[in-house]
Image: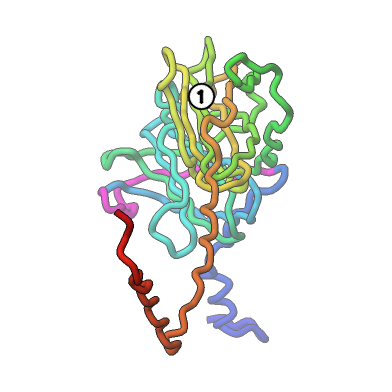
Amino acid sequence: MRVIPGISLSVVAAALFAAPLPAQPGESRPWNVAGRIDDGDRKDTDERRYDEHRLRLEAGRRYRISAGSDDFDTIIQLFQPGESTPVAENDDFNPETNLNSRLSYTPGETADYVLRVLSFGPEGRGAYTAQAELQPPLPPPVAAGATSQGATQWQIWDGELGDSDPDRDGNHFDDYLVHMRAGETRLISLESGTLDTMIWVLRAAEREGEPLDMDDDAGPATDALLGFQAEDEGDYLIRVTAFSSGATGTYRLRISDALTPPAVAPAEPEPVPEVDAAAPEAEPTPPPPAPDHPPAR
């Protein structure tokens, strides 16, 4: 065996068997990987084979992560280090036309995340590609006043979902900023002649979180209609989006003025005077004296 002077065997072994560094999508270079699901891969609790890849994601930055295959219906799941429940997952980018997977995610902390690629069914095998890329920050929500006002006290905005708008799991959206007081109720209507509209309501500070309420088809045809009551005073987002991934088109958003007054805090009860238990009880008032002459007849 040849020994290299000055270098210990432990250092050589560490260099040979060190774990690969996690991939980190950059400003102009998306991360790409080509893989294959085979019979020898690990299985999840549903008997589906999968591959895993480590990704270095930075807190507060938006990422788009996707996977596709010509051989099987892909699913992607994103895990925080050491966790068994995914923080985000997606099956079909567009269930009607595209069975590949895509999700958007903004991590709350910088860490080495795990991207799992698997098949929708346990029989899925074959080649796939996966990609992660940085996305621009979300644009500020629309805070401008309504373009018109209806006779029934509706605030009305006319807008359009386009290819340049941000998307969540492939669904484009516009956000509208509304301040609401605790206990206040608003009606929200979203109409379109070309879109199957959906309404989401979120807290303004949690744009990437789960909606507080949502609706798809409560209005006429495929229009959305929703009544929402705010539990707390603060800023809320009314999200205009569509049921189908990638859908674009014009819409009209209506938000009513408050239908119910905000909750009023109960009045403070008046203080009850304290009673001194040691104080002597007051003597009863004696009855008036009897008259000394008979009453007149």
Q: Badge 1 is on which residue?
A: 242
206 above or below 128? below
Q: Residue at x 66, y 40 (%)?
A: 135
Find residue 112 and report its image quarter. bottom right
Q: Residue at x 58, y 53 (%)?
A: 107
- Density class for disc 1 (Cα within 10 Å; few <14, some 14-19, many ≥20) is many
Q: Foreground: 203 or 153?
A: 153
Way the structure is coloured: rainbow
Give x and y (percent) for residue 147.
71, 19
Give x and y (percent) for residue 293.
34, 68
Q: Foreground: 241 or 200?
A: 200
Residue 58 seen anywhere in this rendered image of the structure: yes
Queried whether the magenta region covers residue 147, the answer comes back as no
Left or right of 71? Residue 62 is: right
93 above or below 280? above
Q: Residue at x 52, y 34 (%)?
A: 260
How many numbered circles are shown?
Answer: 1
Give x and y (percent) for residue 128.
45, 38
Residue 249 seen anywhere in this rendered image of the structure: no
Left or right of 168? Residue 28 is: right
- What secondary structure is marked by label 1? strand
276 above or below 114? below
**In the image, which residues are magenta?**
29-46
Q: Amino acid at mark 1?
A: Ala
Left or right of 29? Residue 130 is: left
Give x and y (percent) for residue 167.
58, 32
